[in-house]
Image: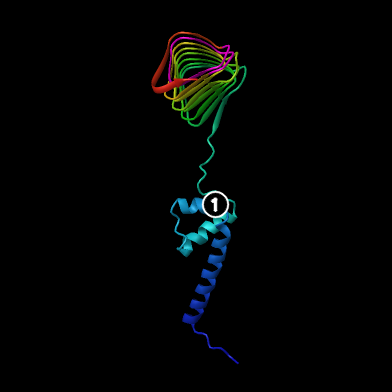
Amino acid sequence: MKWNVNNKMMNNINKNRQNKDLEEDAAALRTEEKLDEMLANDIPVNDSDELMAAINRYEEGSNLETPAEREVSVIEAKTTVYGNIECEGDLHVKGVINGDLAVSGKVMSGGKTNGTIEAESVVLHDAKHEGDIRCAKEITLGSEVSVVVGNITAQSVNLLGKVKGNVSVNERCHIGAQAVVIGDICAKVIEVEAGAVIKGHLDITQDAAVE
């Protein structure tokens, strides 16, 4: 028996086969978080071309919603920089910087910095900084030998080291047992561990409490 198949019928057969394959692939992908990300970002799964492209990118290991990793600039140990620095991404300081820092991402320092720091967040570990620090998010003095001589402004602060200056925090200020703060502290929530030393006024914003 012979079947006479015209172009229109063949196109319909291919289209049905493609739709079936797409439905099977889509059903398999629904158990994966990737498809959830696609749906959350309004990728039309009922559009065969878009869905096929999404499936192809998924099979190639592409993450549709993960932005490119932020670049990290490094000031190496035994390196001294004189002058202001503007940095896109994160900045890791192992050496010495004498100048203001304007960083779009995080500043991580185990060295010495002198000047104003403006960044998304700052982590100082075994580091010394002279100058004000202003952050959109958190400032952390991650060791008891870390020292800041200057005012601190941030969303939240975690102090395990020493600060000589005023601390202004929108949310939570945590002061560790080995911390020393010489200056006034203003925050919504102030947590002070036993053993911490504070020489200054504590100003609790409205609806806040000391823990």
* Camera-nearest residue between 128 and 40: 40
* Quarter location, residue 95: top right
Q: Residue at x 55, y 31 (%)?
A: 72
Q: Residue at x 45, y 63 (%)?
A: 47
- Label 1 crowding class (10 Å Cα cut-off): few <14, some 14-19, many 20+? some
Furthest residue toward right: 77
- Up the image or down, 13 lies above or below 166; here it is below
- Up the image or down, 24 lies above or below 89; here it is below
Furthest residue toward bottom: 1
Q: Give the residue type at disc 1.
A: Lys
Q: Residue at x 46, y 11 (%)?
A: 165
Disc 1 target residue: 34
Q: Tell me the magenta residue range.
A: 175-195
Q: Residue at x 45, y 55 (%)?
A: 43
Image location (x, y in percent) of residue 208: 42, 22
Instruction: Give the left or right position of residue 188, taking residue 69 as reference.
Output: left
* Quarter of the image that includes the N terminus: bottom right
